[in-house]
């Protein structure tokens, strides 16, 4: 690991001033630090967001659940407000990685990293959430751009995420047993943002499946997912499963999610 400077700002404004050039923002560090140890990332400085209290917390107001970017997965899973407003989101957070990851990893860090098999992006896209940064508000449909790529500009800081409270929602994932990342994960919801089906783990990034959304909009029932074919072109193939296998899993997991919603 190369040497680097370390900064611990006390405000978002201070962090934004420091996050320039080769400096990197760090939240829970569950992705960045391993990359640095492997020599895949070599920032000149780390700007640690951990001391900015305004970036933590959960609140429900006006039909929306808002979660601070530095709120850990464990805190989301244990939050009474989250469990009451969107139980599916609390359950998703409770099954991310292992206990260490859940106690260190954060909502904002997961979204900014945009790992193609991460769980949180499916909830954000599957609920039609909005991402608030220190500069603007970004709709979920405009935020995720591709493999580890988002709409965030250099130095832009996620401050919170606002989720519309749905009528129904559920997340089901078929996980890789060692890493607990999703081989395929499907988040379904019916609510203010309409019917949405978001998939993680299957492709280069999270994506929606319109064919399933249309069927479920017509009838919210498990059987509506039956007979839907998801094209395998562009999906991942690796030692854990082929693109065709992942494509076949998507409607099956969607059916299970709807049944449990």
Image (cartoon, helix red, strand yellow):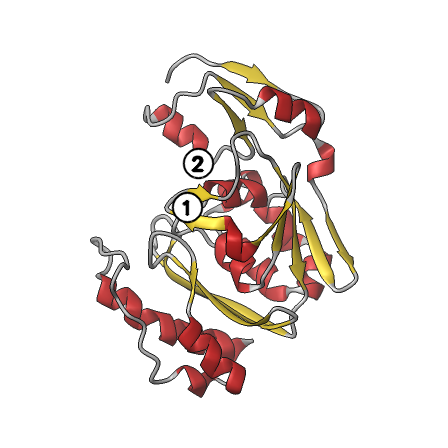
Residue 64 versus residue 76 in the image, above or below? below
Whole-percent x, y for residue 114 in the image: 45, 45
Q: Which numbered marker is on residue 63?
A: none
Left of 200 or right of it: where is 29?
right
For label 2, the crowd category at 10 Å Cα-Cα, with few meaning under 14, some 14 to 19 and many 20 or more, is some
Residue drawn at point x = 68 percent, y = 58 percent: 82
Give the quadrant of residue 135.
top right
Residue drawn at point x = 61 percent, y = 57 percent: 129
What residue is pinned by disc 2?
A: 31
Q: Quadrant of the C terminus?
A: bottom right
Left of 170 or right of it: where is 252?
left
> Which secondary structure, mark 2?
loop
Q: Nearer the viewer, residue 79 or 226?
A: 226
Whole-percent x, y for residue 240 in the image: 24, 56
Residue 171 versus residue 252 in the image, above or below? above
Asked if disc 1 and disc 2 are in contact, CB closer than 8 Å, the reply is yes
Give the quadrant of residue 50.
top right
Left of 13 or right of it: where is 118?
left
Q: Quadrant of the N terminus?
A: top left
Whole-percent x, y for residue 214 in the image: 47, 79
Residue 67 versus residue 183 in the image, above or below? above
Q: Nearer the viewer, residue 24 or 99?
A: 24
Q: CA distance from mark 1 to mark 2?
A: 9 Å
What residue is pinned by disc 1?
A: 115
> Which secondary structure, mark 1?
loop
Residue drawn at point x = 60 percent, y = 43 percent: 72
């Amino acid at each position: 690991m190369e040497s680097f400077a370390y900064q611990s700002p006390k405000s978002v404004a201070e962090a934004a001033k420091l996050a320039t050039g080769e400096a990197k923002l760090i939240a829970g560090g569950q992705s960045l630090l391993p990359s640095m140890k492997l020599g895949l990332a070599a920032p000149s400085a780390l700007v640690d967001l951990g001391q900015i209290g305004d970036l933590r917390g959960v609140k429900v107001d006006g039909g929306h659940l808002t979660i601070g970017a530095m709120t850990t997965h464990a805190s989301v899973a244990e939050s009474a407000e989250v469990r009451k407003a969107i139980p599916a989101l609390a359950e998703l957070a409770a099954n991310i990685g292992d206990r260490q990851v859940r106690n260190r990893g954060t909502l904002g860090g997961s979204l900014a990293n945009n790992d193609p098999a991460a769980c949180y992006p499916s909830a954000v896209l599957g609920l039609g959430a909005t991402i608030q940064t220190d500069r603007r508000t970004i709709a979920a449909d405009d935020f995720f751009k591709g493999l580890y790529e988002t709409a965030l500009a250099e130095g832009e800081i996620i401050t919170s995420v606002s989720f519309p409270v749905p009528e129904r929602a559920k997340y089901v994932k078929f996980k890789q047993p060692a890493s607990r990342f999703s081989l395929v994960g499907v988040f379904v919801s019916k609510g203010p943002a309409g019917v949405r089906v978001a998939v993680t783990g299957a492709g280069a990034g999270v994506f929606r499946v319109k064919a399933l959304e249309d069927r479920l909009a017509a009838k919210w029932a498990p059987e509506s997912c039956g007979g839907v074919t998801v094209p395998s072109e562009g999906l991942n193939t690796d030692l854990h499963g082929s693109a065709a296998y992942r494509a076949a899993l998507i409607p099956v997991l969607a059916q299970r999610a709807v049944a449990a919603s």
